[in-house]
Amino acid sequence: MDPFSRRAAVEVNHGIISLGDGAKNTINNYHHPLPSAASLSWPGGPGRLSPTALAAGRFVGREQELSDLHTVLQSGTGLITVAGLGGVGKTALACRYAQMRQDAYSPVWWITADSPDRIEAGLAALAVRMVPELNSAPLPDAAAWARSWLACHDGWLLVLDDVAAPADVQDLIGSLGGAGRFLITSRLAEGWQDLVDRPVTLGAMPAEDATELLRRSSGRTDLADAARLSARLDYLPLAVAQAGAYLSQTGISVGEYLDLLDHSSAETFRQAATGTPEDRTIAAVWTVTLDRIAAEDTLALEAFRTLAWFAPAGIPRSLLTPMADQRTLVHALGLLRAYRMVDIVDGSLSVHRLVQEVFRTPDAAIRHREDEAVARGRARSVDLLTRARPPLDAGLEVWQRFLPHADALVAYTTSAQDDSATTGIFEAAAGFLGSQNLQHRAVRYCSRIADFRERTQGAHDPATLHARANLAAACFGAGDRVRARDLLTANLSDQQRILGPDHRLTLASQAYLAAITYTDGDRDLGIELLEASLDHRERALGADHPDTLVSRGNLAVAHHERGNMGRAVGLFEAQLGDCVRILGPDHFDTLRAGYHLASAYHAAGNATDAARQLRAVLADCERVLGASHPLTAAVHSDVATVESELTQQPRDDIEQMGADLIECEREHGPEHRNTLSARAVLGSAYLRAGDVRSATEVLEPALGYALWVLGPDHPTTVNISHQLGDAYYAAGRHALGTEMVREALADCERMLGPAHWETENVRATLVHMAASSVVTRIPGARAGSRLLKRMRRRSRLDGSAPPDGHQGWIRPDTDPERVRVAAAEGLRRCRKGELRASEGHLRVAADGGNTSAMANLGMVLARTGRPAGAEFWLLRAVEAGEEAASGPLGGLLVERGRFKEAQPWLRRAAATGSVDAMMDLGHVLIRTRGGRSEAELWYRRAAAAGDPEAARFLEQWAVLHPRRPPGPS
């Protein structure tokens, strides 16, 4: 073959191609020597900071941590480690420090150090920054040159972010000696003792800082409910920043974001604003941590999945004992603690609440959160709680450790997930709570039990009937009489047919229906039914049966409230003796019977015996129930009240009474009878101390809840109404105060009789008001406005501070959902014509700030013949911005003959297009000299708006008052 005919097929030429049989190539490589690491200085300019950290303008708080970082880095070894849970803000803190202190170091160099390879890459990048020719050098060579340079120079700061283990950086730090400074962040909080004394552990942000971070991240400085959302996210910086960025991008409200968390939390935890790195969402951050844990110990991963279903704090380590032997379990929990996924204090475990929520939420797209893995953790938690379930008589301390985790289980699961094991836990918890009279906490357990029994055993099975009866009892004890009555009515016929009329459950349903009848206002029929229930139980169950003792106590309470103190004291004394003999002196029913007997002594005017009985009951309650139990707190408060009466010295522990009320409201809810009693006591104490503003703030919601829960004829309601009227009168609202006290007196005379001591007390207040020389009406809107401004102050009317420097009771935040529900229910009852029934709901909503409820309450009071109260609430509604209330306010003033005062309000309402206000204004003006022409104008406007009465009036007007023809010019 001709050698010159050969051809080379070349597609891409990457170098020298030699053709021909004898071709030779000579390559000469010329090496330019690299500069010595020791001879080369930093070229100046900024170093390298984190590409993913928060911008400096969005960083909030952490001033003390930043100061501590600088102090440590500028002294001693110049090495500090910041450790903590993923998402707690370690990277953001390091970046903020680096941004603030760039001038103090030369240079600041950031390395993402979650693996040895990335540490080497970060060092190589530093070398290339110094010597660009090293870009083509092998990575280890460039990294080695960077190490040499760092070893030869000082004044630099190396930030090693997200170090997985101390061993990954130990050699680097050891080889560089004390030449520069190291700022390390790590999820691992243990194992640093060979490098630093101990790492700085970073926690969640303070509430105020977290709220400010949310506002800055969203770019909305006036963000409504920002505090509520930051609290929902448990003040975790990454979660708060992620939420803020999402709000900024989507423009949705905080309420809508909270709704996303409640209904689609898996997607919400995973999604972030456009441009957010996928590994910087809260779902991804913790997944990486669990990857590291799972690589070391699978038991630790399974234990963590199980812990997600318990309460966030106070988890006994012994609860997990069945999972593994002691040594293995200790190692697994230690690993979780090292990564700050759990904390261990005094043998109890705690887990961040948001971390729990994330890993209770299935998400097939996220490792460790697959459906099967989440379900396995839930099933194991149920098994562990079943094993740890204490017996009913285990004691309060044991149950206090167990109940939070049962509460978590019922809150975190749905009824569709319930099985026999879950229901067993719920039955045990409900039984204990019922024995402690904590029915409001037992309701949700009883509801789940009843659903499970009906679903698995049928609607008419005895077990289902039993569960429904327990649910009705819990609802009644929690104050939900409507639901209790509906449940009992539906259940009673089945119980009588299936169980028989003398069965214990049938008798219990009859007793509860009798109590509801009494509580709902039919007092005479209620007492008759309670007497019949007691007789029936004595015949069917025996005089010594515990249920019979309960019936005797219920009947005694009814007679107490009706003012039949002789009968009430006799029944309570018999009940207490039987309880001590049958149940024992330490049984809860025995303690409660002793408390009721003391209250009866006090109501009968026997304060000495009441004080003696209360002191004995208080000692027993503190010994058996503990100082924090609601019954103990109630007895303690009554001891102080009765002893203050005996010594003729007013109570001086108002701050403690306020704290007791807040605790009672937290434990029972604002509508519970214990809370109402605590409010009444505190309001009375404020009134005696001269702090009218605080007394009004306490008593106004108390009256609303008393009307809602107890009804207008209950003695507690009448007592609160009496005190609130006294407070209004002391505040200068004389007409309203007198009206309320007069109404309370009428109720007392009707319910208790004219000679009862409470009736005499209310009558004395009314006599004092009538005899006072300052009984004058405050006319006009200006005076009403001034009154409202005075009442907004926490000082007395003379401007002086309350006694002992007390600043008034600070009411807890009002639940917006409860206010909304109360306003809607009040309006519904108004439309049905149930005006007195609507008053309690409207008062609760009005006190919570609902302006529509204020206006509706004013109109209800006007229609039920209480004009002073109506004027007060309509004026408050207008002052709060409810313009629709100005028309009814003007109309009310017209009805009371105060025409001049009515005109500004009617003009205000007529200007908004209110036809009724136009007509009322016309009627007022026609009575006013010189106002007839303007009256005709308003009548014409009302007719133009379609009011037929206005059109007829104008026709009559034209006949009676014809227009005169114009005269000669």
Image (spheres, rainbow, N blue to C red):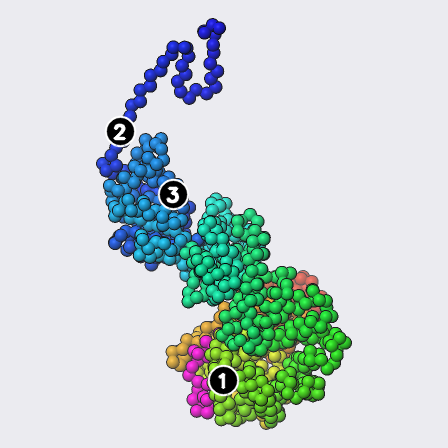
**Residue that badge 3 annotates:** 116
Question: Which residue is situated farthest in the right direction here?
Answer: 497
Between residues 896 and 941, which one lies in front from this camera angle?
896
Residue 143 can be seen, yes or no: yes
Specify whether residue 653 is painted magenta: yes
CA neighbours of label 2 inside 10 A, class few (<14), some (14 to 19), many (20+): few
How many C-alpha atoms fall within 10 Å of the one at disc 1: few (<14), some, or many (≥20)? some
On the image, the x and y values in percent for residue 552 come to 63, 87
Query: Which residue, given by chain and number where applicable, does mark 2 sit on?
Result: 33
Residue pushed farthest top? 2
Q: Secondary structure at mark 3?
A: helix
Q: Nearer the viewer, residue 841 or 197?
A: 197
Q: Amino acid at mark 2?
A: Pro
Badge nearest the viewer, 2 or 3: 3
Q: CA distance from mark 1 to mark 2?
A: 91 Å
Whichever of labels 3 and 1 marks the residue nearer the N terminus, that label is: 3
Q: Are marks 1 and 2 in contact (CB under 8 Å)?
A: no
Which element type, helix, strand or loop, lies under badge 1? helix
Give the percent coordinates (x, y) of residue 648: 44, 91
Locate residue 69, reporting x and y percent.
31, 54
In percent of the image, x 54 and y 79: which residue is there?
A: 674
CA gap, disc 2 and disc 3: 29 Å
Badge 1 or badge 2: first in the primary sequence: 2
In 3D space, how far apart are the residues under numbered discs 3 and 1 (Cα atoms)?
Answer: 65 Å
> Residue drawn 55% across and 47% down?
365
Q: Which residues, given as a range, are shown in magenta?
A: 639-662
Q: Amino acid at mark 3?
A: Pro
Task: Identify which residue is drawn at 42% across, 83% down.
Answer: 652
Callouts 3 and 1 close, C-beta under 8 Å: no
Q: Which residue is mark 1?
A: 620
Image spot of residue 777 (x, y percent): 52, 81
Where 443 falls versus 10 (above or below)? Answer: below
